[in-house]
Amino acid sequence: MRDQVEQLRAKLKMQHGVPAKTLAVASGKGGVGKSNISVNLAMALAGKGKKVLLFDLDVGMGNIHVLLGLDAPYTISDFINRNIPLAQMICGGPAGISYISAGNGFAQIVEMEEAAVSRLVTELELLQYDFDYIIFDMGAGAAPSSLKVLLSADDIFIVTTPEPTAITDAYSMMKYIYMQQFSTSLYLICNRAEKEKDGMLTLNRLQFTVRKFLGKEVNILGVVPEDPHVKKAVSRQLPFYSAFPHSAAARRIDELLNRYVSGNPDGPGPRAPVFMRKLKGLLLKH
C-alpha cells in the first residue's frame, strides 16, 4: 500500500510540478576553481530564494562538502552498492542549499546493470520536481562516467582561467560537446583573473575561436577576479559568497548570475523535462 501511495504521489508531482533547471559546471582541466564557482553560484541562487541542489560529480576528487565545511555521510557508491535512495543521500548546506557527494562511485555508473540505471533515472527524475535548480559540479575534462549528465544538462558553464593551457583545454571541451550535436547552451566564465581586461580578453578569444572554427555561438558571462578572500574562505571551509559577501569575487558572482538569469527570464519556468529526456536516451540506449 505504501509503495502505491508513493507511486501516486510521484505521478502527481510530475504531472503538476515544474522540473528544475539543470546546470553543469565544467572545465577543460583541473585547478581552475570550478567547484568554488559551483558552490558560490548555488549560494547566490539560494539568496534569491531558489531551492538548489548541488550534485557533486567530480569523480574521485569530489570536494563540494569540504568547501562547505560539512560531512558527506553518503556518496554515489552507497546508491550503487547499498541501494540508498538518492533522496536519502541529500544533505543540508548553508543558506538552505542541498548537496549530494560524489565520492568515487559515480564512475561505476557506466558499468551498472540495467535495473540500477533505471533506478537512477527514476529517482533523479523525481528529484527534479523538488528543486528550482540542480547544479552538477562535473569532473575536469571529459570523464566518460559523467559525460552523459553533462550532455543532458539544460545549460553548461565552462570555467577557465587566463592560463594558456586552461584556455586550450576549455576550447577542447567545447569542441567535444558541440561534436555530440546536442542542443545545449554554453556559457563562459573566466576565473582567477589578475585584471579584468585579461579575463575579458580570454573570453573574447574563446568566443571568437568557437565561432570561427566550430560555427557556434557561446555566451560570455564574465570574469571572477583573483581575490585573497577566496583563499581565506577555502581555508575556513566556507563559501566566499557568505564568508565575505562584499568581496570582489562575491560581487562578481552576483553579476554573473544576474546576467545569466536576465538572459533566461523564465528561470526554471514551465518547461518540458528536456534534461531527463536526453539523459534517458543516453543512459538507457542499447
Image: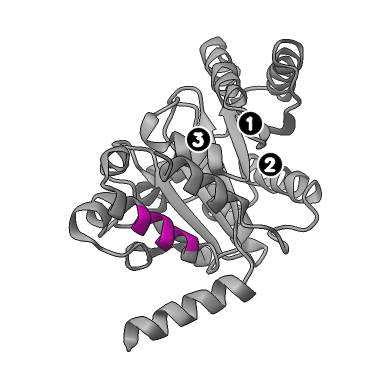
Residue depicted at 47% across the width and 42% down the height: 137
Q: Quick check: 262 left or right of 117?
A: right
Residue 113 among magenta residues: no
Q: Earlier in the sequence, mark 2 or mark 1?
A: 1
Q: Nearer the viewer, mark 3 or mark 1?
A: 3
Q: What distance separates the C-alpha of mark 2 from that of mark 1?
A: 8 Å
Query: Where are the magenta residues, as a range?
Result: 118-125
Report helix, strand or loop for mark 1: strand
The label on residue 252 is 2
Name the residue at the front extreme: 286
Q: Which residue is mark 3?
A: 34
Q: Is residue 230 visible?
A: no
Q: Are marks 3 and 1 in contact (CB under 8 Å)?
A: no
Report helix, strand or loop for mark 2: helix
Q: Nearer the viewer, mark 2 or mark 3?
A: 3
Q: Quick check: 29 left or right of 63?
A: right
Q: Which residue is mark 1?
A: 225
- Residue 87 position, x and y percent, is 38, 67
Residue depicted at 35% across the width and 59% down the height: 119
Q: Earlier in the sequence, mark 2 or mark 3?
A: 3
- Residue 12 position, x and y percent, is 55, 79
| Figure check: 182 above or below 69 | above
Q: Quadrant of the N terminus?
A: bottom left
Q: What distance separates the C-alpha of mark 3 from that of mark 1?
A: 14 Å
